[in-house]
Image (tube, rainbow, N blue to C red):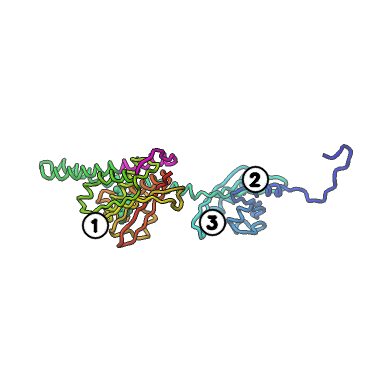
Amino acid sequence: MSPAGAAPPVTTAAPVTALDQARVLLTGLPEPVLLVDDDKRIRLANPAAAELLGPALEGQGALLVIRQPEQVAALERALSGSPGERQEARLLLTTAAGETIYRMVVHRLAEAHGLRGVLISFLDISHVEEAEQMRRDFVANVSHELRSPLTVLSGFIETLQGPARDDASARERFLAIMAQEARRMNRLVSDLLSLSRLEANERIRPRERVVPAEVLRATVAALRPLIEDSGIQLEIDDATAEASVPGDRDQLVQVFHNLVENAIKYGGAGGRVTVTLRTHPRWPGILGEALSVCVADAGEGVDPIHLPRLTERFYRVDSHRSRQMGGTGLGLAIVKHIVNRHRGRLAIDSERGRGSRFTVILPRG
Ligand SMILES: Nc1ncnc2c1ncn2[C@@H]1O[C@H](COP(=O)(O)OP(=O)(O)OP(=O)(O)O)[C@@H](O)[C@H]1O
Ligand SMILES: [Mg+2]
């Protein structure tokens, strides 16, 4: 404050305009923002807008950057609207990194200090749309998976009520198939429940200590009938000396069960499945000591193009074959979630014709 009676200091700087004030505020905003006047000229573009739409935007016509008809229409509507009104449009940008979807919001500003125009902001909604798409796919997949056994069941019910009513041998056969389809639906539903429970507690790391070698032996014992039926030689090569890890026993049973079952079902042609357990002083991406469990088969392997997608829900390389074997394609998705909950890693390597190796690496501390 100037002392009483003294003349105010003389300044030659230009008066601060509304645009200058807006610039100060908008520069710090992480979202891209443009200020466009009534002549559709860009008066201000913050650094995020320059990053998104290119440099030297100020002074250019807005229609040079806003070109898709839906966005132009939103801009026109906003310019002829009243202050406070907002219009929206979608903007799809394709870059080398992929497609990004923005929600463009055009907000009519109240006139201030001679500046009339609209504020355009761009909000990246790609992940929201992606999540929405995943949800839709998921519902479609579940419905599809449930529909096939249901169709079989209702078909047989009709046959049993009609043509096969008095055919005792047909009844036996049909009931066996119906029981199998009902089991399939049951498995699908319990796998789905298992997944949603896992998602709910994925952030809570298990605390009890379990011995993976013991869990594996118990799992293999439960799988004995399947192993014997398939005529496969299963070998456990364990050098962990009963080492323990913080783990959830039931969940580790699920992990080993699915990996060994997969090795038998899809890698059985090799005639041999080997499970190797090792401890490691360190492992990339794991804090402290680690313990690995590797399930290897000598079967036909997986084409590399499928590998990144194997842990997606419902993803099957050969869905017909997997379905015939009673699989729903949820096993590896469950494995991945369980391994994540244990702060571990899942490594998959496979070569067509040479077999596959699924390795679970668990931190020991
Ligand atoms: N050891 C393996 N060798 C070759 N392909 C495999 C192997 N393990 C898994 N796969 C492929 O990965 C797909 C997904 O496996 P996943 O365990 O998630 O589902 P699934 O076995 O089909 O069904 P589910 O486990 O729910 O019974 C399988 O359908 C199969 O195509
Ligand atoms: Mg499986």
* Amino acid at circle 2: Leu
Label 2: which secondary element: loop
Q: How many marks?
A: 3
Q: Which residues are magenta?
A: 188-211
Residue 173, numbered circle: none
Looking at the image, residue 256 sits to the left or right of residue 123; the answer is left
Q: Which residue position is annotated with label 1?
A: 271
Q: Which residue position is annotated with label 3?
A: 68
Q: Which residue position is annotated with label 2?
A: 109
* Amino acid at circle 1: Gly
Q: Nearer the viewer, mark 3 or mark 1?
A: 1
Of residue 85 and residue 194, the one placed in the foreground of this image is 194
Q: Residue at x 68, y 49 (%)?
A: 23
Q: Residue at x 60, y 52 (%)?
A: 48
Q: Nearer the viewer, mark 2 or mark 1?
A: 1
Residue 163: in sight, yes or no? Answer: no
Most extreme residue toward the front is 241
- Residues at marks 2 and 3, CA–CA distance in whole angstroms: 23 Å
Q: Tag 3 or tag 2, which sits nearer the N-term?
A: 3
- Residues at marks 2 and 1, CA–CA distance in whole angstroms: 73 Å
Location of residue 5 by image quarter: top right
